Image: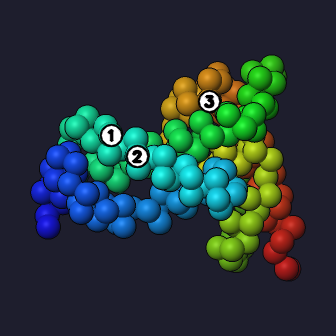
Amino acid sequence: MERSELIRACKQNDLKAQMQVYQMYKDMLYNVSYRIIKNEHDAQDAVHDAFIKAFQNMSKLEHDLNLGPWLKRIVVNCALDFLRKQKKLSWLHDANQLPETEDTQDDYEEKSLKFEDVKKAIANLKDKYRIIIVLYLIEDYSHKEIAQQLGLKESTVRNQYVRGKRLLKEQLQNSIVL
């Protein structure tokens, strides 16, 4: 079934088409959710919530080719909503009080890194840095979009991104065997 036909069938609540969309996107959405939540069970719950919301609102999808990015935005929202409910975004209240810092240039030397080392280093960051790093670097959200999602000032998001990137860089440099 062609993608536009598949989406049309989903809009008509065709369960077979919805299952096909679920199978196509569940792994990608799980990975996005897990990077934000850091818990397998809760990440799966966020994915299921995202699919429920997506199928309930499928009629709002205007351009059928944008299904993947649209689903990704929904799962990011579900993951952040989950963290809000769990009070795991309490750092947001303090974040607006941070003084502004200048963005620093990277003086990063070319080194050999393993993908698993990078994933582990990101996972080890504090939530206030990890979530912003994931949304900006991996999910390709702008600082402005992240600020809107988290209810922060854009300058705060930029500052936490810079600090998080610096901490990530330190972790990665410490993990490389010279």
Question: Badge 1 is on which residue?
Answer: 56
Q: Amino acid at mark 1?
A: Gln
| Residue at point 76%, 62% (across, down) | 121
| Residue 131 x %, y % | 66, 45
**Left or right of residue 102, residue 64 in this image:** left
Question: Badge 2 is on which residue?
Answer: 52
Q: 33 or 141, which lies in front?
A: 33
Q: Is residue 64 visible?
A: no
Secondary structure at badge 3 equals helix
Q: Are marks 3 and 1 in contact (CB under 8 Å)?
A: no
- Neighbor class of circle 3 (other Cα within 10 Å; few <14, some 14-19, many 20+) is some
Q: Quote the CA–CA distance across marks 2 and 3.
A: 22 Å
Report the quarter where the N terminus lies. Answer: bottom left
| Residue at point 55%, 61% (across, down) | 31
Q: Are marks 2 and 1 in contact (CB under 8 Å)?
A: yes
| Residue 110 x %, y % | 69, 70
Instruction: Give the colouring mode of the picture.
Output: rainbow
Secondary structure at badge 2 equals helix
Question: Badge 3 is on which residue?
Answer: 150
Secondary structure at badge 1 equals helix
**Left or right of residue 145, residue 95 in this image:** right
In the rendered image, the vertical position of residue 129 relative to residue 100, given as above or below: below
- Dot placed on the residue nearer the N-terminal end, 3 or 1: 1
Q: Residue furthest bottom?
A: 178
Q: Amino acid at mark 3?
A: Leu
Q: Quote the CA–CA distance across marks 2 and 1.
A: 6 Å
Q: Is residue 6 visible?
A: yes
